[in-house]
Image (cartoon, rainbow, N blue to C red):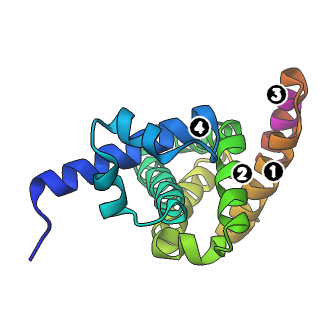
């Protein structure tokens, strides 16, 4: 039996509110703030996510799922090379929040690889298609595979999250993107 429509709606609202709250207030933000912003009771939050760690993992998965959806949509762009660079720019720009979620999961004893396992292949596949189209269009080096591109993205995201000076972040991002071009 599939979940009731209102339960699905509430889960979606809780995830969106949690993403917003954790991005704004950090992963230590109270769960009751998530409930307040979602417009549901705290019991509803815990019915869907019995632990805060489970909520954090679900937010992390949902963010990755959105990356996959965005990559898939961008693969149909008239300029897939530009779309590829745009996606990587956006993802690296959002790196601080992703890093905080990952650190919170690790601190809670949750293996990040296990947490993302349900969406890993979906995201990897969407990025692979976008990468291949960007390479065919001549905007990304042909000798980079999807696993290398993802590893580079993770490394650049971690480096960007560590740099406070915005102009330095922009400069390092440009150097990174230039390195992907043929």
Q: Residue at x 68, y 74 (%)?
A: 109
In primary-sequence order, the first of circles 4 and 2 is 4
Residue under pointer 1? 158
Please name the residue shown 58% across and 42% down the image.
29
- Which SS does the magenta portion mostly show? helix
Q: What stretch is highlighted in magenta?
A: 169-173
Q: Closer to the observer: label 4 or label 1?
A: 4
Q: What element carries label 3?
A: helix
| Frontmost residue, 164 versus 22 | 22
The crowd level at tag 3 (other Cα within 10 Å; few <14, some 14-19, many 20+) is some
**CA–CA distance between discs 1 and 3?**
14 Å
Q: Position of residue 1 (x, y in %)?
A: 8, 77
Q: Are marks 4 and 1 in contact (CB under 8 Å)?
A: no
Question: In this rendering, which labeled residue sits more in front, label 3 or label 4?
Answer: 4
- Cα–Cα gap, marks 2 and 1: 7 Å
Dots 2, 1 in contact, CB < 8 A: yes
**Mark 2, residue position:** 99
Nearer to us of marks 3 and 2 is 2
Q: Return the residue at label 3.
A: 170
């Amino acid at each position: 039996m599939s979940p009731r429509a209102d339960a699905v709606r509430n889960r979606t609202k809780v995830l969106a509110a949690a993403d917003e709250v954790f991005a704004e207030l950090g992963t230590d933000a109270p769960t009751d703030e998530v409930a307040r912003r979602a417009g549901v009771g705290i019991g509803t939050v815990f019915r869907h996510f019995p632990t805060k760690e489970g909520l954090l993992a679900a937010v992390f998965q949902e963010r990755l799922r959105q990356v996959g959806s965005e990559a898939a949509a961008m693969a149909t762009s008239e300029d897939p090379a530009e779309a590829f660079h745009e996606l990587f720019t956006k993802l690296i720009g959002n790196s601080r929040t992703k890093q905080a979620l990952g650190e919170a999961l690790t601190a809670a004893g949750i293996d990040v690889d296990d947490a993302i396992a349900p969406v890993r292949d979906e995201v990897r596949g969407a990025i692979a298609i976008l990468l291949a189209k960007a390479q065919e269009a001549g905007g990304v080096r042909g000798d980079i595979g999807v696993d290398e591109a993802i590893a580079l993205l993770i490394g650049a995201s971690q480096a960007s999250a560590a740099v406070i000076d915005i102009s330095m972040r922009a400069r390092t991002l440009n150097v990174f993107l230039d390195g992907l071009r043929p």
